[in-house]
Image (cartoon, helix red, strand yellow):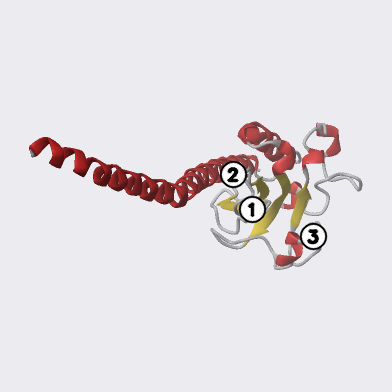
């Protein structure tokens, strides 16, 4: 009797096992794509954050050089060289634009007129937008492409005209703004995301 009972129960267990296996397969079909999307999403965000950190380090390196250079004729040349060195982790084709601009206080963003990519000559006005705009194609320019002559990159806001003083009173602030286009590899979030950062620092006082 006991053997007969076991034989009758086998088909029932086999059917239950089949149903359990089917449920697991259905659940896996739903969960697996979501799991891989989460993994890929985390990877994408991590790569973007890496570029964001590289961007932040680059602009801060640029402002440190800008502050230390003061009103040196070739200040912008030094800024661009510092950006080239510090941006090694960023592919050059991702860098879109660099703005070196006059700010009135710490943390101030570039003037709207500068964000169009057009250099701004302040003329005689201490409150007018003032900036020089650079592109990756300018990275390989030699020192002779700077110096504030009529055809030079830095002619709009000439470094020689930047205000500094021994006491620190009346000195200007200089800012560096950088724009980067980070490509999404999986296209989950679109084609690219625009990353920008800026840093502002007071020009260091110098003896005349």
Q: Nearer the viewer, residue 6 or 145?
A: 6
Q: Distance between the residues labelled 2 and 1?
A: 13 Å
Viewer-nearest of discs 2 and 1: 1
Q: Position of residue 158 (x, y in %)?
A: 78, 50
Which residue is under mark 2? Answer: 55
Q: Position of residue 51 (x, y in %)?
A: 58, 42
Instruction: Name the element at disc 2.
Output: helix
Q: Where is residue 43 in the image (x, y as percent from the top left)?
A: 51, 41
Which residue is under mark 3? Answer: 120
Instruction: Name the element at disc 3.
Output: loop
Q: Which of 78 and 109 is in front in this view?
A: 109
The reply to whether the C-beta atoms of the residues labelled 3 and 2 are less than 8 Å apart is: no
Label 3 CA crowd tier, 10 Å (few <14, some 14–19, many 20+)? some
Residue 193: mark in rendering? 1
The reply to whether the C-beta atoms of the residues labelled 3 and 1 are less than 8 Å apart is: no
Q: Which residue is drawn at 81% across and 54% down?
A: 156
Instruction: Name the element at disc 1.
Output: strand
Which of the two labelled residues, at mark 3 and mark 2, occupies the earlier sequence position? 2
Count of marks overlaid on the render: 3
Viewer-nearest of discs 3 and 1: 1
Q: In this view, does 102 lie to the left or right of 23?
A: right
């Amino acid at each position: 009797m006991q053997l007969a009972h076991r034989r009758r129960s086998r088909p029932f267990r086999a059917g239950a096992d089949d149903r359990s296996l089917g449920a697991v397969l259905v659940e896996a079909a739903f969960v697996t794509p979501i799991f891989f999307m989460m993994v890929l999403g985390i990877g994408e965000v991590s790569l973007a954050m890496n570029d964001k950190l590289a961007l932040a380090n680059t602009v801060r390196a640029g402002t440190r050089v800008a502050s230390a250079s003061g009103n040196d004729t070739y200040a912008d040349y030094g800024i661009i060289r510092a950006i080239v060195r510090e941006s090694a982790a960023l592919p050059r084709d991702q860098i879109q634009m660099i703005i070196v601009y006059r700010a009135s206080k710490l943390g101030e963003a570039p003037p709207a007129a500068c964000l169009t990519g057009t250099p701004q000559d302040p003329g005689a006005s201490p409150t007018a937008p003032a900036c020089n705009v650079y592109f990756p194609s300018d990275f390989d320019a030699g020192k002779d492409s700077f110096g504030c002559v009529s055809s030079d990159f830095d002619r709009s806001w000439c470094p020689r005209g930047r205000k500094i003083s021994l006491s620190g009173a009346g000195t200007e602030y200089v800012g560096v703004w950088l724009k980067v286009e980070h490509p999404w590899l999986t296209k989950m979030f679109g084609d690219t995301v625009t990353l920008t950062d800026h840093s502002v620092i007071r020009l260091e006082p110098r003896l005349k």
